Image: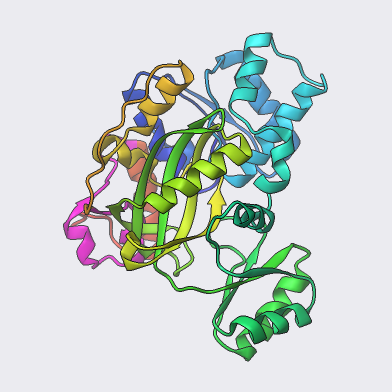
């Protein structure tokens, strides 16, 4: 299940095909996931309409008979959770095997309070000994003032639910904070104020089954686009035992099934202490890369869901990769583009879609001579 111009699901279809899966896609017409040449079947729905998405998902499950469902955005996760509830109360029906499949690809209902609130999840994990930045939920301007008096500037204001850096404000002084607070408190969304510990960030990708971690890889984020709170555009492969321990706690707490991507503030480019800043409870934007440079997530899903041992491959520590087209869009003259990049060569539909995105940005595709 994909949404908008998210890169992760569009790129992961090919990885799944290469380890033996047949793949059906569910997205809105025009979305990146609908552009890949490697899908065996396609289902389309208005991703803004939850009822339509649930009914289209039900049609996909009954007609395609999948072994696994992979949501790739927070909204997709919500749709899958709603579908689970609809099945649970009998408003829609499946045979026992397919009903169990849906439950095996989603979260227990009692996990949803934490799953859909970054604020509550971090507070709960802090109680379990996980290192997080100081944070406080915002109800009034006075809450923010009290927090700054205690922790100082800079601070970051973050919505309790969301992705892609949307709605995040970094504030270095009182004027910036007052302006941002006006937007946040009027939005109707839950917000927290958090101590801003800098932009040395790392992301861990993992696969979990029945609350247990079965595969993982980690990267230090060298560049992001757009802005320093946006998605990753250049990564360096790394390893951090503290991040691994945090991921195990997350998976056990939530009864995790599928792919996840917690993000951290780190010291010493990832080898020092790590502070958890959020969990993205879905695939990341470059899970396909691990087929070449670490533990293969597509193979891990295949093996975990068929109760076979998952093969762990040592990651290529220190390797730097420019993500395509993110880094080209960030800086078409970036020196990182001269090294390893992840062009989707052989996927003509996706290459054409990416070329269009790059042209709209006003840059040229990698290798372009026009």
Residue, x 46% and y 42% (percent of image)?
32
Looking at the picture, the colour scheme in use is: rainbow
Residue, x 32% and y 64% (percent of image)?
269
Q: Is residue 16 above or below residue 35?
A: above
Q: Is residue 71 above or below residue 129?
A: above
> Percent from the top left, x then y, of residue 290?
31, 39
Residue, x 64% and y 27% (percent of image)?
57
Q: Which residues are magenta?
A: 320-348
Of residues 157 and 53, the one drawn nearer to the viewer in this rendering: 157
- Quarter of the rendering containing residue 347: top left
> Percent from the top left, x then y, of residue 22?
43, 19
Of residues 362 and 95, the one drawn nearer to the viewer in this rendering: 95
Quadrant in which the C terminus appears: bottom left
- Quarter of the rendering containing residue 216: top left
251 falls in the magenta region: no
Quadrant in which the N terminus appears: top right
**Does residue 59 appear left or right of residue 259 in this picture?**
right
Report whether residue 130 is seen.
yes
Of residues 317 and 292, the one drawn nearer to the viewer in this rendering: 317
> Percent from the top left, x then y, of residue 65?
57, 14
**Does residue 176 appear left or right of residue 357 in this picture?**
right
């Amino acid at each position: 299940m994909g949404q908008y111009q998210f890169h992760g699901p569009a790129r992961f279809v090919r990885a799944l095909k290469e380890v033996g899966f047949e793949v059906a896609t569910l997205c809105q017409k025009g979305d990146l996931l609908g552009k890949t040449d490697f899908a065996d079947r396609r289902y389309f729905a208005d991703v803004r309409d939850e009822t339509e998405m649930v009914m289209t998902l039900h049609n996909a499950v009954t007609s395609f008979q999948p072994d696994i469902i992979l949501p790739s955005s927070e909204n997709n996760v919500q749709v899958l959770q709603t579908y689970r509830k609809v099945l649970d109360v009998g408003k829609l029906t499946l045979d026992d095997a397919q009903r169990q499949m849906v439950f095996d690809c989603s979260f227990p209902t009692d996990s949803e309070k934490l799953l859909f609130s970054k604020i509550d999840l971090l507070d709960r994990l802090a109680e379990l000994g996980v290192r997080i930045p100081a944070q406080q939920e915002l109800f009034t301007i006075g809450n923010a003032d009290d927090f700054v008096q205690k922790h100082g500037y800079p601070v970051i204001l973050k919505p309790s639910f969301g992705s892609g850096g949307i709605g995040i404000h970094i504030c270095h002084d009182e004027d910036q904070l007052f302006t941002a607070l006006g937007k946040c408190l009027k939005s109707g969304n839950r917000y927290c104020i958090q101590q801003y510990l800098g932009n040395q960030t790392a992301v861990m990708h993992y696969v979990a089954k029945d609350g247990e971690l079965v595969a993982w890889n980690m990267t230090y984020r060298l560049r992001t686009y757009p802005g320093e709170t946006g998605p990753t555009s250049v990564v360096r492969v790394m390893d951090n035992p503290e991040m691994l321990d945090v991921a195990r706690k997350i998976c056990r707490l939530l009864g995790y099934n599928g792919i996840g991507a917690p993000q951290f503030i780190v010291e010493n480019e990832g080898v020092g202490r790590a502070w958890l800043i959020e969990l993205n409870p879905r695939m990341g934007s470059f899970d396909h890369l691990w087929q070449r440079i670490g533990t293969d997530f597509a193979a891990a899903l295949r093996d975990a869901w068929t109760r076979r041992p998952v093969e762990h491959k040592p990651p290529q520590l220190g390797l730097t990769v420019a993500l395509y087209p993110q880094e080209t869009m960030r800086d078409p003259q970036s020196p990182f583009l001269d090294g390893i990049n992840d062009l989707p060569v052989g996927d003509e539909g996706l290459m054409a879609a990416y070329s269009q995105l790059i042209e709209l940005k006003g840059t040229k595709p990698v290798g372009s001579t026009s």
